[in-house]
Amino acid sequence: MDIFLLILGLALILGGANFLTDGSAALAQRFRVPEFIVGLTIVAVGTSTPELVVSVLSAAAGNSDVAIGNIVGSNIFNVFLILGVCALIASLPLTGGNIRRDLPFLTAVSVLLLLLTSDRLLGLGEVDAIGRIDGIVMLLLYIALIRYTIRAERRTAAQATQTTQTEKPQRSRSLWLIVVMIAGGLAGLIFGGELFLDSATAIARALGVSESVIAITLVAGGTSLPELASSVVSLLKGKSEMALGNVIGSNIANILLILGLSATIHPLTLGGITRIDLLTVLLSSVLLFVTAFTFRRKAVDRWEGAIFLVIYALYIGYLVR
């Protein structure tokens, strides 16, 4: 039965990713919104729903380490595994806006997370924690950042449109169909991810796999399955900007929106989350930014994707040693 549910969950994930990608692309075409913005907002926040549910409920129940650990693990997974896999399939081109704005923003947000959880190191308290005021500031920063990014991308898109006036507008799908495709795609990703995670965990336990390995690999990766599926499918459909926007947007939303909301509900303490884990989150952001200037410039190429996957494997090996 677990194997059947595993296959069913995988089918829902793939089908949901397909519908979400097509619906999001149609939305971008209909309203002439850059695909990167759709990936950064609708797709990123939508696929981060599992992290949102887990972290907010954990914060409300007082399980701070679960709330923070979920986000830390997801952000590491998103960059090193998801972008690593995507880059092996095809190089991910980086735009000028990615290099000047989006990747520095992601790196700054990762630095902010490290600073907010370093109270003892900075002499600001006896316990490393993200307080309610910190949470409110993070939420405000997220709103301001998304608003600024959307305005900047629209200006860039408007300039590009002026230089390509000869292009004929394509007929777009009706709005109700687009909404159904996006909502149905998200539902398939979320419910399929839950089925896949639950059944995979049951199979692993039946095979004698330890609880620690299950928690670090299946649970951490399980909430990021929607991002993985939607990014890979977007890339296969030639929507590389949407795939990249999904990961960057998800990581920013995970820290500022989800942790911000969680900390506003209940102050978060680090618990079992170590400095190494937080530094690995920062490392993922820095290395992603560095890819713009190495090997094939302004792109995450296959070599860098392979390096990302090796780093993720080493990190998992460190955790289970």
Image (tube, helix red, strand yellow):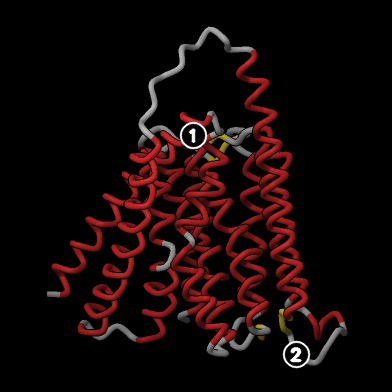
Percent x, y of residue 102: 67, 45
Image point 87% across, 84% down: which residue? Answer: 123
Percent x, y of residue 292: 65, 39
Q: Residue furthest top?
A: 166
Image point 72% across, 49% down: which residue? Answer: 104
* Left or right: where 246 falls relative to 17: right
- Secondary structure of the residue carrying tag 1 is helix
Out of 211 and 27, give the one closest to the viewer: 27
Image point 76% across, 67% down: which residue? Answer: 137
Callout 1–callout 2 Cβ contact below 8 Å: no
To which quarter of the image does residue 67 belong? bottom right
Q: CA distance from mark 1 to mark 2?
A: 45 Å
Out of 65 and 213, give the one closest to the viewer: 65
Examine the rendered structure and indicate whether residue 42 appears above or below residue 150. Answer: below
Examine the rendered structure and indicate whether residue 170 appears above or below residue 49. Answer: above
Instruction: Read off the residue under disc 2.
Output: 127
Image point 26% across, 73% down: which residue? Answer: 200
* Left or right: where 200 falls relative to 80: left
- Secondary structure of the residue carrying tag 2 is loop
Examine the rendered structure and indicate whether residue 215 appears above or below residue 290. Answer: below
Q: Nearer the observer, disc 1 or disc 2?
A: 1
Q: Residue furthest bottom?
A: 126
Instruction: Read off the residue under disc 1.
Output: 28
Examine the rendered structure and indicate whether residue 23 appears above or below residue 186. Answer: above
Percent x, y of residue 10: 25, 59
Out of 34 and 216, give the one closest to the viewer: 34
To which quarter of the image does residue 94 belong? top right
Residue 252, numbered label = none
* Left or right: where 242 falls relative to 2: right
Question: Crowdedness of circle 1 by 10 Å Cα count: few (<14), some, many (20+)?
Answer: some
Q: Residue furthest right?
A: 123
